Amino acid sequence: MNQPLQFTKTLTITLITISLFCHSIYASSSLESSLRLPIGTQDDTLKRVEIVEGKTNTPIPFQHQNRIDLRLEFEKHFGTDIIKVLEDVCYEKLGYMPIIFILGSCTYAVNEKGELDWNVIGDIDIKVYSDELVSEIQGEKIAINFFNILKTKRNIVVMLEESPGGSRIIDQNQKKFSIDITYHHKRWLATYSNIDYHLFQLYRIDSLCFGDTIMLNEILNKNLLLILKPTIKSYIDVINTANIYASKTLKQLYQLAYIRKKHLEYSWLLEEYKKLEKNFDKDMLKDDVKRAIKSLKIDEDLLFNELWELYIEPQQQNIQYVNKNNRTQL
């Protein structure tokens, strides 16, 4: 290879490295948090970065990955890809593809085969993150078109409510599923706040994400801490505020186990939930909640380390020049 060309290429890679590392330090310093990145690993090998092709030339260390193939699950249960319908309607009405989050029990309520257990799923919460805040009128138009296509072109039974964004669909077993669509500005995804009202708008590691996922990854990589902080805050809140008199608490606790990839050990929580929905027993519920909390309770720093190893560590090959013995500086 021509030596001047090789030198230029090496210099370019070095400058990108320095820029990314400095940006990470600057961004993390703005967070008011005592959480630290995990340390103590033996391998301090410097890691390379992959450049994402397409919309950006920015190095993307972390990329969100859906743990459930929700498109396939919707296809199997409702006979159509509900997500694709919403993506098409959003693109038509907004003129671009927004970021779409699916929340609720359909993001974690899986059986031992890894398939969704529709017996414990009720609401399907959808959050649309756009470049500009969607007006109430725009939101209603999106919802009306979305449900109209499901009803007239996809043969799904739809029950329209006064607020179209909160209508319901009915499956072949006559079970009703409420679909709640809300709209948010994409800036909230990277705006951490200790105010609980804003917390629900933030990215969660267990969310199922669709639409413009390239934009989502760009936002998340402005600061890697934002990937885990809201999830940890929610985890601790559920543990500290668990309602021992509401059966849905069992689903919330199962979700915590799912986040930590321990859900197979806690499958009994969903079974107990189904029993209590048929025949409520407050003493049984109280015992179940206490048992689960006792085993799921964990220190925040330990939880951060655990989630880092589960979700961030596997993608470390995409992170450029990260010294694994000195992650406290990121």
Image: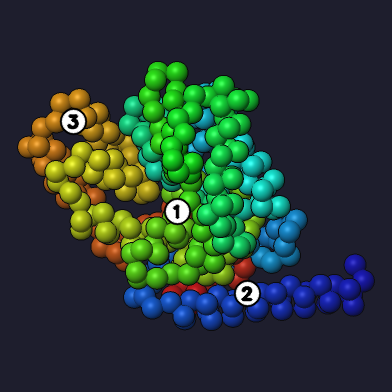
Q: Earlier in the sequence, mark 1 or mark 2?
A: 2
Where is mark 2, residue-wise? 20
At 26% from the left and 45% from the top, the residue drawn is 253
The Cα atoms of the two marked residues, 1 and 2, are separated by: 23 Å
Instruction: Say what amino acid the circle numbered 2 marks.
Output: Leu
**Residue with the most extreme front position:** 162
Where is mark 3, residue-wise? 276
The Cα atoms of the two marked residues, 1 and 3, are separated by: 29 Å
Q: Say few, some or many: other residues with alpha carbon within 10 Å of mark 3 (under 14 / 14 to 19 / 20 or more).
A: some
Counting from the top left corner in percent of width and height, residue 65 is at 54, 48
Numbered circle sitting on residue 205: 1
Q: Earlier in the sequence, mark 2 or mark 3?
A: 2
At 23% from the left and 44% from the top, the residue drawn is 249
Element type at mark 3: helix
Left or right of residue 106: residue 276: left
Q: Can you tell which of label 1 and label 2 is closer to the viewer?
A: 1
Element type at mark 2: helix
Counting from the top left corner in percent of width and height, residue 4 is at 90, 77
